[in-house]
Amino acid sequence: MALYSTVSNSPKLLRIAIVGVGLVGGEFINQLLRFPAPSPFRIVSLTSTKTTLFSPDGLHITTSGWKSDLTQSGLKPDLTVLTRELSSLVKPGQDVVLVDNTSSNVVAALYPRFLRAGIHVITPNKKAFSSELSLYESILSASLESGARFLSEATVGAGLPIVSTLKDLVATGDKVTKIEGVFSGTMSYIFNEFSTGKEGGPSFSSVVRIAREKGYTEPHPADDLNGADVARKLTILSRYIPSLRSALQDGYQSVHTKSLVPAELEGAETGDEFIRRLPEFDAQFDKLRADASEENMVLRFAGVIDVKSGLIKADLEKYPVTHPFATALGGSDNIVMFHTERYGARPLVVQGAGAGAAVTAMGVMSDLLKLV
Ligand SMILES: NC(=O)C1=CN([C@@H]2O[C@H](COP(=O)(O)OP(=O)(O)OC[C@H]3O[C@@H](n4cnc5c(N)ncnc54)[C@H](OP(=O)(O)O)[C@@H]3O)[C@@H](O)[C@H]2O)C=CC1
Ligand SMILES: N[C@@H](CC=O)C(=O)O
Ligand code: NA
């Protein structure tokens, strides 16, 4: 309540254009529409791949009606037109924010243009900061040039304060020596359910299907199972560490990454096809599980950034059944351990749900609140 009243007293008005209205975007819109009055937020635009809505003074939408309003709109999406329209709304005391809830490279490539026009960008989309260094650098310089902010807490660990924690450690002069953890909600859920250290258990394909149904996976679940999602998160984090900032010129593709996608499924075009065919490969995952449990170990997909050696890797590892990755994690939990000079032998640890619409939208919302 105290937080809301602080916000309510703010005279600042924020106009918000939302691109991407799927699982995360839809939940974000609903959280925004439920924000207590008087709200400083005006949703001026909604955009999907098919249609768009725009009104400079704010759309008159409701939680139960926005979806059909958008579907029935006769306006086709055009991000160039949107940039122009939004630029004209940037005025002193009246900020404009583009919230990108897609996983699109095309939208991510437009961030420098939005930022240069003075439009803040908030996103859970990992593409921009985990791709080639040139895009990352042009986002930073566009933001510096105009003063518009780029905020992306939800790109790592959804709503968990992982990006902000790392930024604070670095900005206050601590030296990060290593970051390690379980960075994927999907991989966490899959292996928490699949590999418990006991013999047998559910099939690999069935737990992957459930992870998708729970909204943890990327739009295409292969982007989780091939390790790319974790590699992207490690790239994003490493770019906040001064000595590693320029290490990954080509982005996440330079991270040593173990893929769990069977070679035969690499060409699966849709998530549905991927899920349908995955049971054909259950036996090979059963064998990995059996080998681990024979040694009293569990399987966990972990990531590490070793600052000193420069090693950045995402891999399927075996851990003793007594290890925190085996005992402390449940559901889609992420756990991230920051080893730093100040924290010494006992790392700073952040843990909790790292995927799912509600917690991801909350991460986006928390970035929005940083602007008011
Ligand atoms: N799910 C989770 O737990 C987490 C997700 N994220 C990130 O959140 C983002 C959204 O994920 P999620 O909601 O699950 O994805 P969805 O597939 O459910 O939604 C994506 C939305 O983006 C729209 N879209 C895609 N490309 C474009 C484009 N070029 N122009 C306009 N709209 C576009 C789609 O339009 P249409 O409706 O027409 O298909 C859809 O509305 C992703 O970047 C993901 O990595 C981050 C942390 C956690
Ligand atoms: N697919 C991702 C979603 C959050 O980034 C995950 O499983 O962690
Ligand atoms: Na986060």
Image: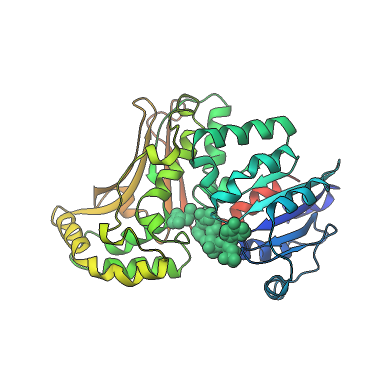
Q: In what quadrant does ligand 1 lie?
A: bottom right
What is the x, y in percent for residue 174?
Answer: 51, 26
Of 59 and 182, the residue lying toward us: 59
Of 36 and 94, the residue lying toward us: 94
What is the x, y in percent for residue 57?
Answer: 85, 59
Q: Residue at x 51, y 33 (%)?
A: 133
How did the renderer colour the structure?
A: rainbow
Res. 190 image quadrant: bottom left
**214, above or below 254, in the image:** below
**116, above or below 188, in the image:** above
Q: Is residue 161 left or right of residue 254?
A: right
**209, above or below 140, in the image:** below
What is the x, y in percent for residue 85?
Answer: 79, 51
- In this orientation, does residue 202 appear? no
- In this orientation, does residue 220 appear? yes
Of 59 and 177, the residue lying toward us: 59
Q: Is residue 372 left or right of residue 329?
A: right
Q: Quadrant of the N terminus?
A: bottom right
- All told, the count of numbered labels is 0
What is the x, y in percent for residue 341?
Answer: 44, 25
Q: Residue at x 54, y 29 (%)?
A: 170
Q: Residue at x 56, y 36 (%)?
A: 136
Q: Is residue 178 left or right of residue 356?
A: left
Res. 121 image quadrant: top right
